[in-house]
Each structure stands twice: as structure tokens, then as C-alpha cells.
Image (spheres, rainbow, N blue to C red):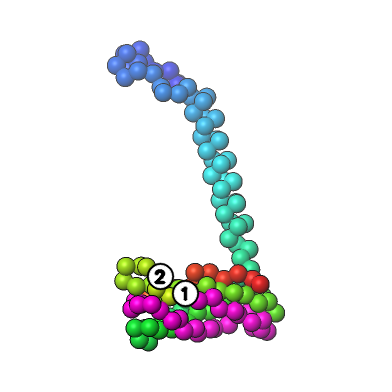
Amino acid sequence: MNEVPEHLHARYGGPVVPPRTARILLIAAIVVFGAVVVFLGLRFADQPVRVETVSYDHLDAEHTQVTFIVTKDPGTRATCTVQAMNAGRAQVGFVEVEIPASDARRTSHTVEIATQGDAVSAEVLGCEEV
């Protein structure tokens, strides 16, 4: 069934790789893909501290306010990194915020960032458990 008729072989040539090699390469690609999916799943599913930006408010040319929600285990402390950016996506303000331990799993925080220019957006870059 895998044989190529002689007139097609003469016109188009034979297969680039033999069928057995193609099956081995396909199985190897599936195994590597599965390993990458498992690794990424384990890496990102066990985040001790998660954060989501709720809003930001442009107060004036030198200040921007950011509100975000931190999800972490009760009783743990964290440090979050927040930045403000101008229209060209350049960083014009930066602050690290200490999140104290609390009994709640999700807590809301608002921080004001001093900027060195007119900020048009802000984001929380990430949080780490302390």
C-alpha cells in the first residue's frame, strides 16, 4: 500500500523520508509536545501569588493610581511590582508594594505611582511571596 507506482515515482520522486522514519518522528514530536504541556502546566498552575489589575487612574502629569487584586494564601506576605508607562510604552514610573499578611485569600490594593512624565497606562508586572 505504501509503494509509489513507478510512473509517479519517476515524475515526482520518492518520499522524502521512509514511512517508518516518519512514524518515529511523529511519535517523538508528540512526546516532546506532551512534555512541554505538562511542564508548563506544572510551572504555572502552582503560582503561590496571583495578581490582576483592576484599574488605573491618571491623576495628573506626575501621578498615576493603580488598583489591583492579589490572591495568595492567608497569612503570607508578598511584594508586587507596579509600573506606569507613557504613550510610547516606555516606563515613566515604578514602585514595589509590600502586601502584608491577612486572613483573606483575595485582597484589593490601591497604590499611587510618582511618574517622570505623562503616563497613559499602568500595570502590575507581578507579585512574589516574601
The relative height of residue 33 versus residue 96 in the rendered view (above or below) is: above
Say which residue label 2 marks.
91
- Horizontal side of 88 relative to 17 (left or right) equals left
In the image, farthest residue toward the front: 116
Residue 118 on image: x %, y % = 33, 78
Question: In terms of secondary structure, where does tag 1 sit?
Answer: strand
Residue 106 appears in the rendering: no
In the image, farthest residue toward the left: 11
Residue 4 on image: x %, y % = 39, 18
Crowding near the residue tagged with mark 1, few <14, some 14–19, many ≥20 C-alpha atoms within 10 Å: some
Looking at the rendered structure, the kind of residue marked 2 is Gln
Determine whether label 1 and label 2 are within 8 Å by CB: yes
Is residue 117 inside the magenta stretch? yes
Is residue 57 inside the magenta stretch? no
Question: What residue sits 60% from the left and 57% below the top?
Answer: 43
**Which of 5 and 80 lies nearest the eye of the viewer?**
80
In the image, farthest residue toward the bottom: 59
Residue 125 on image: x %, y % = 49, 69
Residue 46 on image: x %, y % = 63, 63
Say which residue label 1 marks.
94
Q: Quadrant of the N terminus?
A: top left
Q: Quadrant of the C terminus?
A: bottom right
Q: Which residues are magenta?
A: 94-120
Residue 65 appears in the rendering: yes
